[in-house]
Amino acid sequence: MLSKLAWVLSFAALFGSSLVHAIPKKSNNKNLINNANIKNNDFQIDQDGALVHYSGSDTNVIVPDGVRAISFGAFMDHPEMETITLPEGLVTVDECAFYGCRGLKSIRLPESVICVERLAFGSCASLEKIYMGENVSNIAELFVCDCPNLCEFQVSDKNSNFKVFDGILYSKDMKNLILCPQNTPEVVSIPNNVTTIKEQSFFECVNLKEVNIGENVKYIDEAAFYGCKNLKKVNMGDSVRKIRSYAFAECPNLESFCVGQNVTYIGNGAFFNCNNLQKFTCLNKKIEFGKDVFTEGLGVTMYVEDDSDAYNYAINNKYNFEIL
């Protein structure tokens, strides 16, 4: 389990992002207090109200009132736990708090929760649904990851930061696509309101076969579609300006891709390990290419304008090309 955790936490190093750093250490706070009402002292709670460690083995867990934070790894690797009740007054769910809780089927974040950190619900294999209360305003990239059965987000109507449309989590104004549940449909259409597809938003959505990108999307951020192993077709108009690093990496079923006429940047490794990519069309003459956009030795043919940046990229990297 820890090897998978270490891999995910080091993932962003592939494209130089600051989103994921080294694994922080568990709290060494010695000022732990025990709640006399807690059965068998299963919960260790520090003087600031942070639940530091859970040592029980119950199927249905109720976190005591007064807890304001679930600390790093507090419930890590409790596969026996199927339900958990979190108290009102809880403010923060820290990194990896429920990592590896493979039996956990749903999460309801109380209305008081503000912040959910990265991998808080990582590798929760049975997790199907997450409810987010009205005050959630800060969720980290990959706050839920490696949850293949996750199919539903729910957000309080009173939440002013996020909303759900067609099962996908968006910013309230619908300008940012935040996260698609991993158990996504085969075809996804992104609304025209959206301007940015955020980092890792479709991370390892292996069911996804086709995506229709809305008419106003300008930015496809880092690793947005990383590991969508069955993604075969991307329908993208001319609104897109930047395809950032590793945006479509590890998509081995992607066979062709057309870069619209307003794209000015394709980041490092954007199509790395897309080993079946055969046709890559560039409609803009001025495109900045990052490093190793394709896997070395890939048999892709680039369709380019004469004397364009894409033409020069193909020449310099010895890719097959044809003039449009």
Image (cartoon, rainbow, N blue to C red):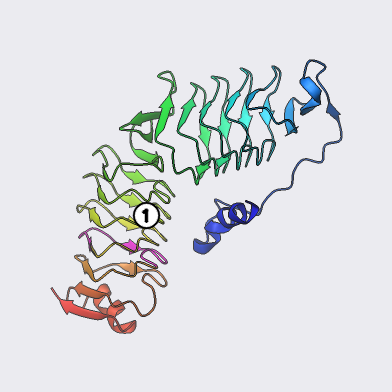
Quarter of the image that includes the C terminus: bottom left
Classed neighbour count for the residue bearing mark 1: other residues with Cα under 10 Å, few (<14), some (14–19), many (≥20): many
Q: Which residue sits at x=24%, y=54%?
A: 234
User: Quick check: 309 left or right of 247?
Assistant: left
Residue that mark 1 sits on: 228
Occupied quadrant, residue 262 = bottom left
Residue 47 visible to an observer of this rendering: no
Tell me which residue sits at (56%, 53%) in the image.
8
State the image quarter where residue 259 is shown: bottom left
Secondary structure under the numbered disc 1 in the rendered image: loop
> Does the magenta segment cover residue 262?
yes
Q: Position of residue 74 (x, y in %)?
A: 70, 36
Look at the image and give the residue range highlighted in magenta: 257-272
Is residue 280 or residue 277 the one in the foreground? Answer: 277
Find residue 284 and report its image quarter: bottom left
Q: Furthest-right residue in view?
A: 30
Seen at 22% across and 53% down, the residue is 236
Instruction: Judge whether residue 264 is colored magenta.
Output: yes
Q: Amino acid at mark 1?
A: Cys
- For the point 70% across and 19% down, which residue is it? 64
Q: Is residue 34 visible?
A: yes
Q: Position of residue 261 (x, y in %)?
A: 20, 60
Residue 170 rendering spot, x and y as whole percentages: 38, 35
Principal secondary structure, stretch drawn in magenta? loop
Where's residue 3, x and y in %?
62, 56
The foreground one among 51 and 140 is 51
Image side of residue 179 versus residue 99, left or right? left
Query: Above or below — where is 176 with respect to 12?
Result: above
Q: Front-most of 227 and 116?
A: 227
User: What is the count of numbered marks?
Assistant: 1
